[in-house]
Amino acid sequence: MPIEIDVTLPAKLAQRPPVAWFPIDTLAPGQRTVSSGRWFAIPTSGTVERKNNRMQYRGAPVTFGARGPDSWCVLVTDTAARDETKGAYFVAGRDFDETVEVPPETWDQYLESVASADDLREENAAAGRMAPVYWPKSGAAPRLRGFRYRVRQRLEEGQPVWVKVNAGRQATEIRSAQLWRHRGDLTVGERIPSSLAPCSDSDELCPSCQLFGSAEIRDSGVDVREQKSYRGHVCFSDAIAQGNITRREWIPAALRSPKPTAGQFYLDNSSFGTSDRIGSETDAVPRSAWGSQLDQVRSRSISGRKFYWRTSEPIKGEHPRGGAHRFQIEAGKADDAVNLVDPDATFRYTVSFDGIRRDQLGGLLAALAPAIVLGSPDKEIVTSIGGGKPFGFGAVSSTISGLTVEGARHRYLGGHSEDELDVTGFATEFATSIPESGKSEWPMLERVLTLGAVGDNLVRYPQSSSAAAGVNDESESAFEFWQSSRGLGRPATKLVDLPQVQVRDQRIQLDAPKDGV
């Protein structure tokens, strides 16, 4: 059976707007709370009028009760991304007198959009169907104001959602909130040059896959899968600690899965000027989003390979950027404790290789110890291992302490190998084999691998303005940065992306939102 949803459509008479925004204090005054899906009536003295490009309610608190001809149904959503200086509003709709069909492809799209929602994480999946909503959301005692439906891979009868309807009275999109995830128009594969696509043919491998191997499994027909894999030429032993190692237990700052949908960071927006970056009220999605208005002008490519700045002191300070906040620990939302190894610890391991060319060996040595082909004596070139890289953990310097190379003549005939060179010699052969055009980005790679290229105090998760000002040291989860940098139309904000690697000042400047633009 097809899925059907009752909707209120915006094409109603202007004197009876079907959708309006209600201040939280009119829905949940005093100690009252409001739950998503409840019906209410507004007092005769209340009015719904246009303000800041949307219809808003002005008047006394509303009265909840049974559904009637003039009743509104409220949609309560999460307040985590809202600016506490501007108040909170919840949307409500009325006149749900039309029914539209939800095609299978629309429902599949909805399921895909909620697949990685926080509500579906392991720690939240078993929770009840309603989640508490607080406002104000910070401070010593956040105030409970209501309850929202948790995002699930189903919708319940009576649950309000946003729906986009086409001219044929079919739902083309379902959202749990007005500014919710949506499916972009282009895939990752369509946004990267073909020369950088994953290797799929073992006869045409990139230099990295030729050395370390590749795994490719493709569908060749119904119930048939073809494996096109290539075994690598390199093996790594375990890294063994040298001498006494000091460890300490640490509760790290929470890390979640990457969010490539954040176009501020993942898409190349460099060709767009200021006027293109400012959101408009007519935009269906923020300009940072995949498939936004900017992609209609020209399809944006993936901005590049992701690197994290290398730092040395992620656990120092009153509020270390690499540590969980007190409120996260008390609420049971912190990650599990880990063991940190103190700086200056030394580990030793062996890398074995077989059947590679001399320039490939030079490339392997350069990957293990980049300083042999990058940098100058006054720079500390490092790589990173382990977890917590976004907070600066895991920066290590590598030294190749010994190299033994056997060619075919040495292996089978004995004697001294004429193929043997020192580390620098092999690295030089590798560098010589790379055309100058291929080395054009080495200076950027050198900077991103340099320890302390960006000050430790600047390497952290984007802060809200209140956290940056020290008003609330534990309010980084306010997500004000994401709200203010995505090119939203209500209020108007500008799309702000990451500075280029070679830019010395890596601080990100945000413009204040402009109401009514």
Image (cartoon, grey):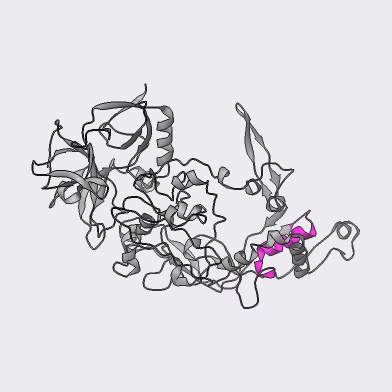
Residue 277 in magenta stretch: no
- Identify the residue shown where x is 40% and y is 74%: 317
Pick out the residue farthest to the left: 44
The residue stretch that appears in magenta: 353-381
- The residue nearer to you, when weighing 167 against 442, is 167
- Identify the residue shown where x is 23% and y is 63%: 140
Q: Is residue 23 left or right of residue 44?
A: right
State the image coordinates of residue 122 (x, y, percent, origin top left): 39, 46
- Residue 495 lies, with reference to residue 202, above or below; the image says below
- Identify the residue shown where x is 61% and y is 64%: 445
Q: Quadrant of residue 397?
A: bottom right
State the image coordinates of residue 310 (x, y, percent, origin top left): 53, 67
State the image coordinates of residue 473 (x, y, percent, origin top left): 32, 67
- The residue nearer to you, when weighing 378 against 223, is 378
Q: Is residue 376 left or right of residue 110?
A: right
- Identify the residue shown where x is 41% and y is 67%: 321
The reply to whether residue 312 is visible in this rendering is: yes
- The residue nearer to you, when weighing 100 against 365, is 100
Pick out the residue farthest to the front: 275
Number of residue marks: 0
- Residue 325 lies, with reference to residue 60, above or below; the image says below
Of the 4 image quadrants, the one containing the N terminus is top left
